[in-house]
Image (cartoon, rainbow, N blue to C red):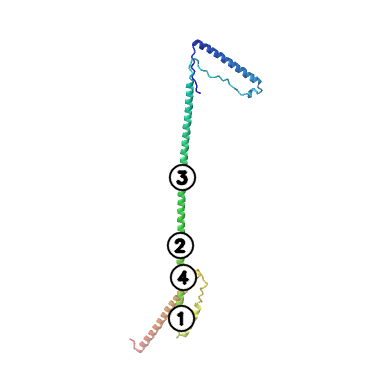
Amino acid sequence: GGLVAHCVWLTPPEQGEAEEEEADGRAEAEAETEETQVEAMLTDPTPLSDRPFMPNLVPPKIPDGERVDFDDIHRKRMEKDLNELQTLIEAHFENRKKEEEELVSLKDRIERRRAERAEQQRIRSEREKERQNRLAEERARREEEENRRKAEDEARKKKALSNMMHFGGYIQKTERKSGKRQTEREKKKKILAERRKVLAIDHLNEDQLREKAKELWQSIYDLEAEKFDLQEKFKQQKYEVSWRAVSKTRGKAKVTGRWK
């Protein structure tokens, strides 16, 4: 139910009597309270130092001769409670707003981190793809170089074999041309038999064939150099013989007086 306002109006003589009665009542109440406390202290077995202290409570005094408006008191209390409730509501919504802002900020950070991780993953994938492409290109380049080197080695091997075959044919041709000079031919055969070795290359690997070709080339080079030296020596001897013959013929002509 609601509160009903009570308005009390007191005249001066009645006011004085009321004050005296009120003062007497307060004094009597205080005395009774003190007596009750003393009796309780005497009958309580608890030591005094351990007993709780209870101060004397005095009810608030309403000024005499004034109008007490309980509706106004109730209204003010309601306003106070409403203000406190409004403050609590505002604080709640303010905290909720901050929490929502923090939640939005947290979501934004999560999305940024997720995007950053995705970008990093994309970059790593591209780098890995580029690395794989470089490795594939390098493998292809090495295979191409290996095939080219094998082809060149095979070509050099065939050329060396062809040169050796031509050299053998040349030797045979020289031997046929020198059939009339049996002694010289036998000498050449002996020399060639000493110099010419059996060519066994079936069991050789690629590196050994390369070394064998170099050895044969060097041998051919040395033989050609020796052949050139012999040819030059033969030319020189032929020239000397011719010169001696000419000199001898001129000497005879001078003695007989037919020098021209």
The residue lying toward the viewer, choosing from 41 and 70, is 70
| Residue at disc 4, secondary structure | helix
Q: Position of residue 28 (x, y in %)?
A: 58, 15
| Residue at disc 1, secondary structure | helix
Mark seen at residue 172? 1
Q: Position of residue 172 (x, y in %)?
A: 46, 81
Q: Is residue 222 visible?
A: no
Residue that numbered label 4 is attached to: 154
Marker count (numbered): 4
Q: Residues within 10 Å of mark 1 (few under 14, many from 20)?
A: few
Q: Are marks 3 and 4 in contact (CB under 8 Å)?
A: no
Q: Mark 2 and mark 4: span between their CA atoms?
A: 21 Å
Q: Nearer the viewer, mark 3 or mark 1?
A: 3
Question: Tag 2: residue type?
Answer: Ala
The residue lying toward the viewer, choosing from 103 and 163, is 103
| Residue at disc 3, secondary structure | helix
Mark seen at residue 140? 2
Q: Residues within 10 Å of mark 2 (few under 14, many from 20)?
A: few
Q: Nearer the viewer, mark 1 or mark 2?
A: 2
Say whether disc 3 or disc 1 marks the residue closer to the N-terminus: 3
Say whether disc 3 or disc 4 marks the residue closer to the N-terminus: 3
Q: Is residue 74 visible?
A: yes
Residue that numbered label 3 is attached to: 111
Question: Tag 4: residue type?
Answer: Glu
The vertical placement of 30 against 234, above or below, is above
